[in-house]
Amino acid sequence: MSMSSTTSALRAKRCARFRAIDLYPVTSEPLSAGRSTLEVLDGLLAGGATCVQLREKEKSARELFELAQAAREKTRQAGALLILNDHLDMALAVEADGVHLGQDDLPLEAARRLAPDLLLGRSTHSLEQALEAQAEGADYINIGPLFPTETKATHQQFLGAQAVEAVAARLSIPFSCMGGIKQEHLAELVGRGAMRIALVTAVTQAPDVAAATAALRRTIQEAAVDAGRA
């Protein structure tokens, strides 16, 4: 798509902001230690998160819409990107910055026709899927799960840290990596080429969400300096 039109200019700005993120926290109220998603979101933003994905699989459409509206206001005030998981219509309705689509969700070409301004992300589980999503017009992909994780309890195959190296060598679009990542994994993942780390429980279950967010971001940034990419 040309970046010369007014609509694509907004998408280009969002893409540039996404390229600059380091931590990519993803919400999940059932995995939030008894706290609401908005409480967790407040902590994420206080800790300096510049992009948050709202991923709430167990809420009704109305509940999710009301939550997304409130999250949009909070992220807008903080200057952070808001990406919704799965729901393109809701992302448009609340003026989110993007939508993250799974392998079984709307095809990227169809999503782009409906939402020319939105960041379009795609979950991928192999290098082949990552390259396919790039060819189909994704603005970014997520690769994973790298390690066993509560959010993919039935998943049997985990890609390991080496998947990051393979994806980093072949993609021209940004990517995040996800799946069971903890603080102790960060230096290796960044060393292998990861620049954006997506996390759920490492932040949502932290006793102090803001402190955990800030510490994780600091570790990623320090690892990037050590890897010569800062």
Image: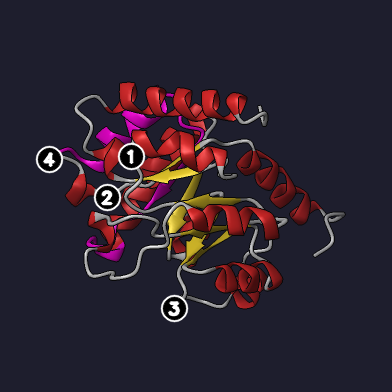
Please give the label number shown on residue 182: 1
Q: Which residue is mark 2?
A: 28
| Horizontal side, residue 114 vs residue 61: left or right | right
Estimate the spatial distance between the alpha carbons at disc 2 and disc 1, rounded to whole Å.
Answer: 16 Å
Q: How many neighbours does mark 3 have within 10 angstroms: few (below 14), some (14-19), or many (20 or more)?
A: few
Say whether marks 4 and 2 touch (CB < 8 Å).
Answer: no
Q: Which residue is mark 3?
A: 104
Estimate the spatial distance between the alpha carbons at disc 3 and disc 2, rounded to whole Å.
Answer: 20 Å
Secondary structure at numbered mark 3: loop
Q: Is residue 119 visible?
A: no
Q: Quick one: label 3 or label 2, which is nearer the N terminus?
A: 2
Q: Quick one: label 4 or label 2, which is nearer the N terminus?
A: 2
Estimate the spatial distance between the alpha carbons at disc 1 and disc 4, rounded to whole Å.
Answer: 21 Å
Which is more toward the observer, 102 or 165? 165
What range is drawn magenta here?
34-61
Q: Which residue is mark 4?
A: 34
Residue 48 spot, x, y in % from top left: 45, 25
Point 87% across, 54% down: residue: 4
